[in-house]
Image: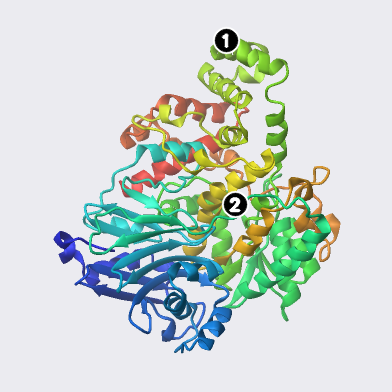
Amino acid sequence: MVLNSASINLLAPELLQAMGNSIRLRGPDDQGIWLDEKIGVGLVHQRLAIQDLSPLGAQPMHSVSGRFTIAFNGEIYNFKQLKTRLIAAGFQFKGGSDTEVILAAFEAWGIEPALNDFVGMFSIALVDHHQKELWLIRDRMGEKPLYYYHADGNLLFASELKPLMLCPFFKKEIEPGAVGLLMRHNYIPAPWSIFKKTFKLEPAHYLRFNLADISAAPVKVRYWAPSLEWNKSLDAQALHQQLEPLLSEIIADQMISDAPLGAFLSGGIDSSTIVSLMQRQSSRPVKTFSVGFNVPGFNEAEHAKAVARHLGTEHNEFYVEPKDALNIISLLPDIYDEPFADSSQIPTYIVSQMTRRQVTVALSGDGGDELFAGYSRYASYARNFASRKAGLANRIMNGLPAPVIARLTRLLKSNQRELSPALVLEKVQRYNLGFNAVDARHYYQNQVGYWLNPETELKSAERLHYALDDMPLREDSTSTFQWCDINSYLPDDILVKVDRAAMANSLETRVPLLDHRLVELSLTVPTAINVVNGVTKQPLRNILYQYVPRELVDRPKQGFAVPVGHWLKNELREWAEDLLSEKSLADSNVFNSDLIRQKWQAHLTTSHDYSFHLWSVLMFQSWHRKYM
């Protein structure tokens, strides 16, 4: 935290200790506190010991010259190579941590040049005593979180919101527009958070604050922006010759750990590729972990077991029952500490809990769908986007008022008569927006939203501007959809889900596919190489085919889905009815309840599944009860 002179009496070890304790599970091995009352800065660090388990790796840490003080969350995977360069330049080191290397690199090369040399995941708070500046820095892909609150001449920052809420001057005022974004996407995209004046630092950015005038607006810089141009001379064989050695090198670096290490294995292409290359480089069976469901259409555990058996890993699995979900749901507001509504957060927490019993570090296969066009929705989006302005449906949509089309739809389609006129009208309006999307970015934004115009379902909310509003168009619609996902869905949903679930169990996750060098390579790959005859992720498949039989690889993509729609009608019905009751919705005083109640009743009494719409409201209501 950084405080103005009027608040300086709040800068006390007791407050910093309490802030650290609130996220102790992120780093249960040690707590370090540093404060300087003269400049009004205090840092607290919770350590999960991974590299150099000795006290020489403790934080906050000071550089040798005394210029820099750092609190750092994450891993720099190439720190040993950087250390060799720094030793050659005359630097000496006391311990074996990557934190000490980071500080030396900042001293030797300067902050931004050093950042460009780092390979890893990180959120960094850095005090530059010479320049009287504070830097907040987030890694390129957004693997590690960084929140900050800047108001009234005070600055708070942390990996989660819980420490901020402990400060006496932090104002817990809900940002209504953020609730609208939550209902639109089931997550709150950066830079927004659930609270006013509280933000998430975007991936690949840093903020530079003037400690002499902390009330002044910080300088914000994006320090990494990869090229989005395809390499049109690239072919599948040339790509393979680059991709497999690079991924193998990345995995070798990410397997370096002074603590026990394993991997998540879903049986899908991404995690199977990661585990295959891990096992190839390991002298002993890799520990692998997966979860499954006893619900038809939702179980990938059997595929994971088959892959593990073929590779010879030491495999562990757990089958999730509704009672497990009920037990975890009460924990979700504390785990995520702002409303977050990707229902696969439940099995992610369970697999992290199971994994942590045996290892401290787990590699994950996240990122492959975004980088190599793996989502099945990309094909349907591209097809529908290309044909959106042609055909009878388009003429009808643009020739008749939406309410008329809604009435005709209810008249002609029996399953639509189950729904209220308002719900059918909402569907018609969504189709209309899709038919009239001006470009691939607008089409994507319409398709990935759950609530069509969520601000109208809130008592007071304006639509907030966020990253998806500014996405550039790429070579084709599919690559545009990928880039949209890389900048929003991946950092603000997938990586949030994994980070919070893992850290709540004191487990560090590493994501080899999100190494920035591999990301840069993937962005040069034309869609025709990623998708061949409708089969996705060809570059990763071509690696995996060398280690796993095709019959274990070539099957429909299932994803890490949760049978939440089924649970809401059965085991979770009482819990959901309580949170979605007229009284509960009135108590939170955020929602206009009519359409929410209609969707809840339609979910219970018809064949339509509104679980994705309802989960965002349920997660907000559950969070609101705990924190407001």
* Residue type at numbered disc 2: Glu
* Residue type at numbered disc 1: Val
Residue 491 showing in the rendered view = yes
Residue at the image position 71 percent from the left and 78 percent from the top: 282
Residue 58, image x and y in percent? Answer: 40, 80
Q: How many marks?
A: 2
Residue 336, image x and y in percent? Answer: 44, 54
Helix or strand or loop: what does disc 1 sit on?
Answer: helix
Query: Where 591 sits versus 516, above or below?
Result: above
Quick one: 147 or 259, which is closer to the camera?
147
Give the number of the disc on residue 321: 2
Residue at the image position 28 percent from the left and 58 percent from the top: 155
Label whose residue precedes the other's in the sequence (2 or 1): 2
Query: Where 242 sits versus 368, above or below?
Result: below
Quadrant in the picture for the N terminus: bottom left
Give the number of the disc on residue 404: 1
Give the number of the disc on residue 141: none
Q: Quadrant of residue 460?
A: top left
Quick one: 616 or 482, which is closer to the camera?
482
Residue 356, image x and y in percent? Answer: 55, 69
Q: CA distance from mark 2 to mark 1?
A: 44 Å
Residue 569 showing in the rendered view = no
Dot 2, how many residues are within 10 Å of its Cα: few (below 14), some (14-19), or many (20+)?
Answer: few
